[in-house]
């Protein structure tokens, strides 16, 4: 992995929000929305050593270099979003450690991560966000203010789970917010909105423009309805 510094972020006792692309693109949709809503400023980025895929453009091959950004406002450092995740365990571990190093460098005391929770519950247009944390004490605090925890025991793979383990190992408090989804292959804008609303309640930070996520979800639902009427297949996330 290559890490490039652009400037020194002007932050004061920030929280960190870190997430990458996952089922239904929930993590990356939420991070990209947060950056747009806050008009955050880029200060550092990470590059994988080689592309994870190439695109055949009808006779010739091309690829786009993936990049994962560190951005900030005064009270928040935001990492991730964009497309993809590291494709090897070594790269994933290296990236998680870099996020922790940046958190320590700027005295972050709490890391939030965002992702998807696959469910067969019929939630309609109102997916629930479930919470897990790096300690029972922190979980008890979250439950007292009205949030629901993830049920039972399960494995959380990829960056959005592993970063909580890295936070715990480095004595940084971590909170994972995971929104329900019913189809991992569909872009899940309502689930991303559920994450943002939960994040607002926990951080007291307002994010403007939530109606944009409703509009994107509505557009997908209308297209699905159209395709069903025509007897076509459901939309598949590229």
Image (cartoon, rainbow, N blue to C red):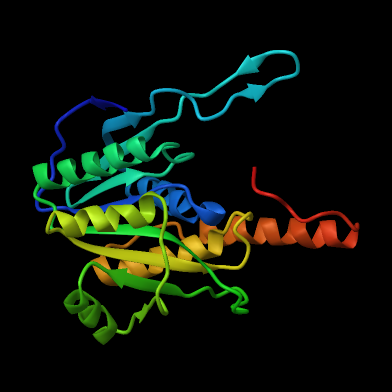
Q: Is residue 222 left or right of residue 110?
A: right
Query: Where is 210 relative to 65, above or below?
Result: below
Query: Where is 225 relative to 104, above or below?
Result: below
Q: Quadrant of the N terminus?
A: top left
How many callouts does the rendering have?
Answer: 0
Residue at left 17%, top 52%? 75
Q: Quadrant of the C terminus?
A: top right
Where is residue 91? Give x, y as percent.
35, 35
Q: 226 or 4, which lies in front?
A: 4
Where is residue 77? Give x, y as percent.
23, 47
Q: Outermost residue, top direction?
A: 60
Q: Is residue 122 left or right of residue 191?
A: right
Q: 131 or 37, which lies in front?
A: 131
Is residue 39 visible from the viewing direction of this image? no
Q: Quadrant of residue 69?
A: top left
Residue at left 13%, top 58%? 109
Where is residue 162? Give x, y as percent.
32, 53
Q: 85 or 222, which lies in front?
A: 85
Q: Quadrant of residue 86?
A: top left
Q: 190 or 163, which lies in front?
A: 163
Residue at left 48%, top 60%? 192
Is residue 126 visible from the viewing direction of this image? yes
Where is residue 139? Give x, y as percent.
24, 77
Q: Is residue 168 left or right of residue 175?
A: left
Query: Where is 142 relative to 155, above or below?
Result: below
Q: Is residue 166 left or right of residue 160?
A: left
Query: Where is 66 relative to 21, above or below?
Result: above
Residue at left 56%, top 55%? 24
């Amino acid at each position: 992995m290559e890490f490039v510094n652009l400037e020194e972020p002007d932050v004061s006792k920030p929280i960190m929000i870190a997430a990458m692309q996952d089922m239904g693109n929930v993590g990356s949709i939420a991070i990209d929305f947060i950056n747009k809503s806050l008009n955050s400023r880029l200060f550092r980025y990470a590059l994988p050593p080689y592309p994870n895929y190439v695109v055949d453009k009808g006779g010739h091959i091309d690829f786009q270099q993936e990049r994962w950004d560190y951005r900030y406002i005064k009270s928040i450092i935001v990492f991730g979003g964009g497309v993809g995740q590291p494709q090897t365990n070594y790269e994933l571990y290296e990236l998680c450690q870099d996020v922790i190093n940046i958190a320590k460098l700027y005295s972050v005391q709490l890391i939030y991560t965002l992702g998807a929770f696959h469910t067969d519950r019929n939630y309609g247009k109102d997916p629930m966000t479930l919470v897990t944390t790096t300690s029972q004490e922190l979980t008890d605090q979250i439950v007292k203010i009205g949030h629901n925890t993830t049920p039972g025991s399960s494995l959380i793979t990829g960056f959005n789970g592993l970063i909580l383990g890295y936070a715990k190992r480095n004595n940084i408090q971590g909170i994972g917010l995971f929104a329900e989804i019913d189809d991992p292959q569909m872009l899940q804008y309502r689930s991303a909105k559920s994450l943002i609303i939960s994040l607002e309640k926990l951080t007291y930070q307002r994010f403007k423009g939530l109606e944009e996520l409703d509009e994107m979800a509505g557009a997908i639902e209308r297209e699905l309805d159209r395709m069903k009427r025509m007897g076509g297949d459901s939309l598949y996330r590229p």
